[in-house]
Image (cartoon, rainbow, N blue to C red):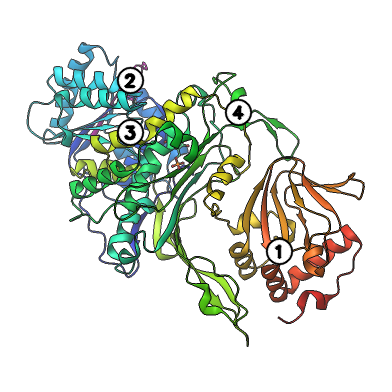
Amino acid sequence: MTDIADAAQVVRSVGADAPDESPPSEPCVMLIFGASGDLTKRLLVPALYNLACDGLLSPNFAVLGTAFDPLTTESFRARMSEDIKKFHTRKDFDQTIWDDLISRFHYVQGGFADMNVFETLKAEVKKLDEQYSCTGNVLFYFATAPKFFGLLCDNLHKSGFKAGPGWKRIIVEKPFGTDLPSALKLNEEVLANWQENQIYRVDHYLGKETVQNLLAFRFSNGMFEPLWNKNYIDNIQFNVSEAVDVEGRGGYYDSSGVLRDMMQNHMFQMLAYLCMEVPGSFEPDAIRNEKAKLLQSVRNYSPEEVSRYVVRGQYGPSRDSTGKVKPGYREEKDVAPGSNTETYAAARFHIDNWRWEGVPIYLRSGKALWKRGTEIIVEFKKAPEVIFRGTPVTALGPNRLIFHIQPYQGIEIQFQAKIPGPRLHLQPVNMRFGYGDAFKASRYTGYEVMIYACSHGDATLFSRGDLVEAAWRVAQPMMDHWAKTPAQFPNYARNSWGPKAAADLIAKDGRRWHEVLTEDVLRKVPLFKDGDMVFLEQVIMALRSRQVSAGELIIKKGDIGRELYLVARGEVEVLDFDGKVIKVLADGDIFGEIGVLMSKPRTADVRAQTSCDLFVLDKSDFSRILRDNPLFASAVQQVAKERYQVNLPTDALTAPR
Ligand code: BG6
C-alpha cells in the first residue's frame, strides 16, 4: 500500500446528506500518452483501480497506453500488475477487480511525432470503442513532458481524432508553461484546433478532498460569509511545508523552483478558492469565472515590490541526528553547482479588490523543511482588550480558523475560554473537526475525481486558460526580478523552518507565521513525551515561534525571565561570566526555565551558535500549564536539578494563581 495520497474520498458518510448514488464514469476509451512513465503507474492506474473498486468506473471502458518504450500489450499489463501492488491505496487488494480492469489495458509503441503511430492509435481506438461499446467517447491523457502538449494536440487533430460520434476530451498535466510567454504560447497551440471546453488542465491539489471542501465550507455555512472580508479578517496565511528535498528530481527542479513548482499553481488555486467572490452557482464556469477574477485582482509587483514583499531561499547541507552530512541543494544530483534556483519562497500578496483591500495574504512553501504540512490560517481581528480592564486579563489572542489540508485533514477554530476558577483568566482553546472522525473514508490518489469528472464533462476541478495566465502574470515579475539579482544562497538549513528572512518579512508587519504543531512533533521533546492529550494541546496552543540568526543574543544576563525556550532546531550556547561557552544545547532542549520559575534575573547569557528555530512559552502560560500538569512539573524539576543543581520547591511550581 502506498502513502502517496492524502486525499480522503468519502465512501459513505454517517448521517450525511444522502447515500452516494453517483453514477459510474461515462463510457470511454482512455488514450494515455506517456503510459510507461511514473505518473501512470503511481497515480493514474491506482486511481482507475479505486474507481473500479467503488463501482464508479463504467464497464464500457478501456485503456490504450502509448509511449516510446518497447512494450507490448502483454508486457504493459504485466508491468502494471507488478506496479499496482506497490502503488494501490486500499487496505486490501481485490484481485478479481484488478484482473477485470487490467484485461482492458492495451498498448501501442511509438513516438509522439510519428504520424504513422497516430494512424495505428486511431485504428486501435476504433477497435476498442467497438469492443467495449464506448459510444465514440475518447479521453486523451497527456502524461508527458509539457514540451509535447502542443505537438500531441496538433497530431491528434491532423489524424482526424476529432471526427465521429461521442465526446473527445484532453487532460493536460502540469506544468502548463514555464512562464507567462510560454503559457500564452501553449494556450494558443492547444486551442488552435481544440475548444476550451475540451481541455482539462490538471492541478492535483484540486483533487484533494480538503481543498474541494474549501468551497463547500465557505458556501454551505452561512455563519462565515458575513465575516469573510477586510472588516473582520486581519490576515490569511497559506503554508505548504515539505520535509522532502528534491528527491532525485534535480534536473526538473533546477529549471523550476518553488515559485513555478508550487506557488503559481497549487497555492494560487487554494488562494482563489479561499478568497474568490460567491459564485452564482456551482456550475463549472460560475466557479471558474470567480477564480480567474480573484487571481486577476492579485497585484502584479514592480521590482521594488518584489524586493519588499517576497523572499526566496535555498537549503544548504546539514548533518542529521546520526552525524551524517546530507547534501545542500547545490550538491544534489543534476543541479548546477552555483544554482540560484529557489527551494523556498515566502511572500506577502495584495488582493486589490473591495473585499480584501489592505488584508495581507501571506504564502510560504519550501522543500527540506522541518515538517510536512499544508495549512491555511485565517486570522481574525482581535476583540477590544479595553473591555477587560480591571481584570487579570492583559492581552487577547486572535481567533483563528485553520484548514488542515494535509497530512492531518481537518478544520479547527481557535478562541479564548475562561479557565475554571474564581478569577477571570483566559486561555486559548480550540474546536477541531477531523475528516477521519466524521467520515468513513478510504485513501484516494486525488486523480479519481479528475478522471471521473472529466468523463462527465465537469470542468470545475480543472484550470481554465485565463486562470493559468492570470497566475503566471502574478509570478512573472518575481521570476524576472530574481533572474536579474544575485541570491545569497544557501540561506537555510535542512530540517529548519526556512530562511530567517521569511520570519522578518512578516515581522515587519507586526505579525508572525502561525506554526501548526502536532502532538507527534511535541512528543519528540523528552520533556513532553509522556504528556497526555490535554497537556499537549495546552502546550500547542501556548507556544509561539521565533527564529534567530547565528550569533544573536537570546537571553541577556540580568534581565528578568519572562519566557522559556525550546530549541526546535539549531544550537545555542550558554556563556559564563567571562563569555566562555559552558554548555551547548540543541534540538529538543529547553532553556530559560529557571529565570521564569524563580522570577529572578537571568544568570547567564544565551546566544545562538547557529541559526535557530525556537519555540517560546510565556511565563503566564508556562506557570498555568505546570499547575495543571503535575507530571510536567516534576519533569521540569528534574531538568533544573540536573542542569543547575537547583531544587525547585514544588509550591514554586504550583502556587495558586
Ligand atoms: C508537485 C510538485 O506538483 O507537488 C512536487 O512538482 C511536490 O515538487 C508535490 O512535492 C507536492 O504534492 P503533495 O500532494 O505531496 O502536496
In the drawing, what numbered circle is on residue 530? 1
Q: Which residue is mark 3?
A: 473
- Asked if one can make out residue 323 in the rendered structure from this viewpoint, the answer is yes
User: Alpha carbon of mark 2 to alpha carbon of mark 1: how far?
Assistant: 54 Å
Tell me, yes or no, whether the highlighted magenta stretch contains residue 507: no
Residue 326 sits above or below residue 653 on the image = above
Q: Position of residue 256 (x, y in %)?
A: 45, 27
Name the one closer to the observer, 193 or 111. 193
Q: Position of residue 304 (x, y in %)?
A: 45, 34
Callout 3 touching callout 1 (CB < 8 Å): no
Q: Which residues are magenta?
A: 62-74
For mark 4, what is the residue? 489
Q: Viewer-proximal residue, 222 or 547? A: 547
In the picture, measured across the screen, residue 259 lies left or right of residue 561, that is left
Seen from the viewer's position, the closer of residues 172 and 471 is: 471
Question: Which label number is shown at residue 147?
Answer: 2
